[in-house]
């Protein structure tokens, strides 16, 4: 995720774990780690999303995205969110949060002015605490962007709600250009195995290895739209972007499209990474203005291009913030590239400029998950220890102050003392974690 909507930051926190509060304001009303949990044909690893835990949150909360009630404006250290059931997945959007329970239910909270919560929040304060999203099927995966949420059912159908946003503002979610405040099914002819969400675009990988995209494509993040049609579809209309369609590869001579199959897909904020069926090659398309895709030159790519610097190595995650990318290899190593400002790459204060090729964070070993927010990054070790680095202004890092953090640093707080972190998700101005009690740890 990345250039999310932002709100003015509340007053600075002072104590280690103190919740800053303010009088209630007018609230808007209704108008990393993701892996598939269904059986695959393509050999992508099955989901580890069977570990039950509790939800911890920190950062800015002035639109209710922390889920701690309408008076909590910010949290410097993790706070516990009260949810009825155990949770197995968490996802932070621009200014909202969604979680998946062991029952396959989705709960949401935060900013709902464009329908990202998928439920009624007309009663004051209901958006600041968890509420259930009514869906007709059990959910296996979640994704969240700036103002949209996407869900994949256990039988491979895709549901979405909210809206996409482009440089001109609200773009709509479906081809009629409307905001969808309740879940709507996305028309796809094939069974989907994995979903991934960027700031305002979505990628779906089918059981046959086909890659479908829809949403905004101004930066090339859909990988199938000519540049002249990326702004609201041009004369072809917005349905060109909002109706899911497959990504095709150019033939060797550039005269025809080949039907390439993919094994995995990951969305950054404004770009997309796709793993070839044999898992040997990585292709990317979208924004590259700070070399965050590892491609030569800073121009956007509107069709898939092979990333030589990522190919030849097995990747379990590739995540991206506003202008940077963090990649996790199958052997637990972390690599970064893109814009270095505010410490988001974790390479130290001497590396505050762009890094054009994947560079390893050698101090991080045995990592099982990575995540990014707009200008922050996270990593979780196999022992459940969370690390953070990047911009400290929004209090997303669980450190002692709001200074920028230039190297990976262990996250702390009372709620973490007797828990292991399973995964982290970074939003526009907040962070969400799934954690489990140390006493309840069993082999996953």
Image (spheres, rainbow, N blue to C red):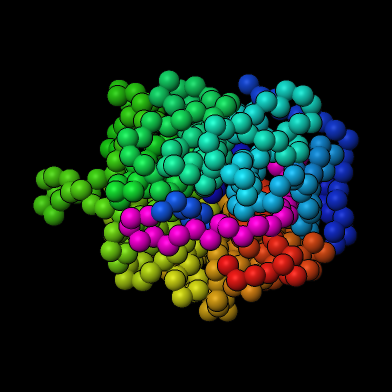
Query: Quick check: 177 left or right of 396?
Result: left
Can residue 250 be seen here? The reply is yes
- The magenta stretch spans residue 377: no
Q: Where's the C terminus, which quadrant?
A: bottom right
What residue is rendered at 57% in x and 27% in y? 182
Principal SS element in the magenta part? loop
Query: Quick check: 149 left or right of 212?
Result: right
- The magenta stretch spans residue 65: yes
Q: Position of residue 409 (x, y in %)?
A: 67, 71
Of 12 and 158, nearer the camera is 158
In the image, residue 408 above or below residue 55: below
Q: Position of residue 308 (x, y in %)?
A: 30, 66
Can residue 403 be seen here? The reply is no
Q: How many marks?
A: 0
**Image: magenta residue range:** 40-66
What residue is rendered at 56% in x and 57% in y? 49
What residue is rendered at 32% in x and 64% in y? 279
Query: Quick check: 270 left or right of 162?
Result: left
- Residue 213 falls in image quadrant: top left
Of 336 and 411, nearer the camera is 411
In the image, residue 102 above or below residue 225: below
What residue is rendered at 41% in x and 53% in y? 39
Of 422 and 154, nearer the camera is 154
Q: Position of residue 25 (x, y in %)?
A: 82, 31
Of 383 and 94, nearer the camera is 383
In the image, residue 175 above or below residue 329: above
- Residue 174 falls in image quadrant: top left
């Amino acid at each position: 995720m990345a250039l999310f909507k932002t709100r003015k930051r509340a007053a600075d926190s002072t104590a280690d774990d103190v919740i800053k509060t303010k009088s209630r304001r007018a609230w808007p009303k209704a108008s990393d780690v993701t892996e598939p949990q269904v059986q695959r044909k393509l050999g992508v690893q099955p989901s580890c999303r069977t570990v039950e835990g509790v939800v911890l949150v920190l950062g800015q909360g002035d639109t209710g995205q922390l889920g701690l009630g309408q008076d909590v404006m910010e949290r410097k250290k993790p706070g516990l969110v009260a949810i009825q059931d155990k949770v197995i997945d968490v996802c932070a959007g621009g200014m909202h949060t969604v979680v998946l329970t062991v029952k396959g239910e989705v709960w949401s909270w935060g900013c709902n002015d464009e329908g990202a919560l998928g439920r009624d929040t007309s009663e004051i304060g209901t958006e600041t605490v968890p509420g259930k999203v009514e869906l007709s099927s059990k959910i296996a995966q979640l994704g969240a962007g700036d103002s949209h949420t996407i869900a994949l059912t256990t039988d491979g159908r895709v549901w979405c709600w909210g809206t996409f946003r482009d440089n001109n503002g609200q773009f709509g979610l479906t081809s009629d250009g409307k905001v969808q405040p309740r879940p709507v099914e996305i028309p796809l002819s094939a069974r989907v195995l994995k979903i991934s969400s960027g700031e305002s675009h979505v990628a779906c990988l089918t059981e046959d290895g086909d890659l479908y995209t829809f949403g905004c494509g101004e930066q090339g993040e859909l990988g199938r739209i000519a540049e002249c049609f990326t702004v609201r579809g041009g004369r072809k209309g917005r349905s060109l972007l909002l109706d899911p369609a497959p990504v095709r590869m150019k033939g060797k001579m550039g005269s025809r499209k080949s039907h390439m199959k993919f094994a995995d897909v990951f969305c950054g904020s404004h770009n997309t990474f796709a793993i070839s069926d044999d898992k040997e090659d990585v292709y990317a398309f979208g924004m590259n203005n700070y070399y965050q895709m590892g491609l030569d030159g800073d121009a956007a790519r509107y069709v898939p291009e092979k990333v030589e610097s990522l190919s030849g190595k097995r990747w379990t995650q590739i995540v991206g913030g506003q202008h940077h990318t963090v990649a996790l290899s199958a052997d637990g190593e972390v690599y970064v590239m893109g814009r270095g400002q505010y410490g988001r790459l974790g390479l130290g204060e001497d590396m505050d400029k762009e890094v054009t090729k994947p560079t390893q964070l050698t101090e991080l070993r045995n990592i099982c998950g990575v995540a990014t927010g707009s200008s922050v990054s996270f990593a979780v070790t196999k022992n459940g220890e969370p690390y953070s680095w990047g911009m400290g202004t929004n209090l997303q890092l669980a450190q002692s102050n709001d200074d920028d953090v230039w190297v990976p640093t262990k996250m702390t707080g009372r709620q973490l003392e007797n828990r292991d972190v399973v995964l982290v998700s970074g939003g526009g101005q907040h962070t969400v974690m799934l954690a489990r009690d140390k006493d309840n740890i069993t082999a996953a």
